Amino acid sequence: MKKNLLLLITSVLAVLSVIEILLRIYGLGNPIIYEKSLLWGYSPMPNQKSKRLENAVVTINEDGLRTSKKFTNTNKIIFYGDSVTYGGSYIDDLEIFSELVCEKLNKIKELYSCGNAGVNAYGIRNIIKRTKNYENRFPNHYKIITIIEGDFYRNFSQIKSLPYFTQPIENIFKATTELTLYSLDLIRNNKRFGDNNNYYKKNHQDFDIIEINESINELVNLYKINKKNNTPIKIIWSPAFEDFSKNKMEYKNKKIFNILQKEIGDDFIDMRNLLENLNIDINKIYYDGIHLNKFGHNIYAEIITEIIKKKNY
């Protein structure tokens, strides 16, 4: 009996060890650690570096910005947004569009520093609050804010409702623990909320419309304050893959898009329109229909670089 029990325990540990090794090779086990903030909700903790999915390196510098380069040049550009801007753990630091923009701008002479303040699952209010934090630390820096329609439906995101870690995993099965906890969190959300957690699939109630309108107004006000202070700022509308299959007028008649385009004018960048004008093969730029792959990040970087150059910043 004892022999059988020992054999069972040994077999289980062997299987778990193999799974753990495979998951670590894939890149799990050392998730990016987040910290809470009363002002902007949450963000990656400063001073960390992790090799993640398929050897993609994610570096968060001493200022809490994703970049592997020094952030000391006089001309500072900070990129804000959600996971589209952040790039995800499947894209290396050197391949996200924020990093590529500075690489392209600094080809002749190193004048610019680029930092990525994008954070997974951010809503508009999170983004706005974080810009104010960095404005205090780096006055009059160039702001590039990339948004998607879904950002207006998230209100003010908090870390407790998300499957991210605020402390390192400290056991011998780190990768297995990360995958297990992440999976359990997704299952929990699906069982508890289902489609009711998806704002794209339901009609908005009156209080939802109020929140969306307030988020629009706050973003427009942020833009106007920066323009009044002669601080360079661009708002980039990043489309989903499915947007390209829709009638162009239908897409442009969306209320959020229309208001932002009207209020922000030339500083509101419709990335869908630019991608279509450049005849970019849309099938090649997306990782999952919303987020960009390596090719997509490079295309965005080329477009943003040219926009910055035109303004002679």
Image: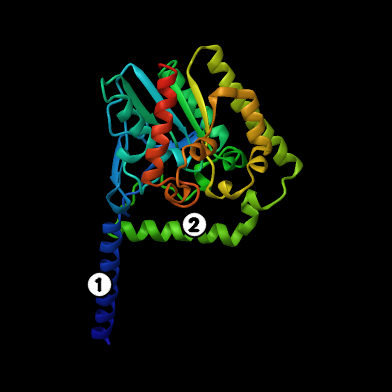
Q: Position of residue 240 (x, y in %)?
A: 54, 46
Kindly identify the amino acid type of the residue bearing the numbered disc 1. Ala
**Towards the viewer: 182 or 38:** 182
Q: Position of residue 191 (x, y in %)?
A: 58, 62
The residue beneath circle 1 is: 14
Per the rendering, the mark at residue 117 is: none
Apparent side of residue 159 relative to residue 34 in the rendered image (left or right): right
Per the rendering, the mark at residue 185 is: 2
Asked whether the beta carbons under mark 1 and mark 2 sit within 8 Å of each other, the answer is no
Q: Residue at x 25, y 79 (%)?
A: 6
Q: Position of residue 262 (x, y in %)?
A: 65, 26
The quarter of the picture where residue 69 lies is: top left
Residue 191 in the image: above or below residue 13: above
**Towards the viewer: 185 or 289:** 289
Q: Residue at x 27, y 85 (%)?
A: 4
Q: How is the image coloured?
A: rainbow
Label 2: which secondary element: helix
Classify mark 1: residues with Cα within 10 Å, few (<14), some (14-19) or many (20+). few
* Quarter of the image with the N terminus in it: bottom left
Pointer 1 or 2: first along the chain:
1
Apparent side of residue 257 relative to residue 71 in the rendered image (left or right): right
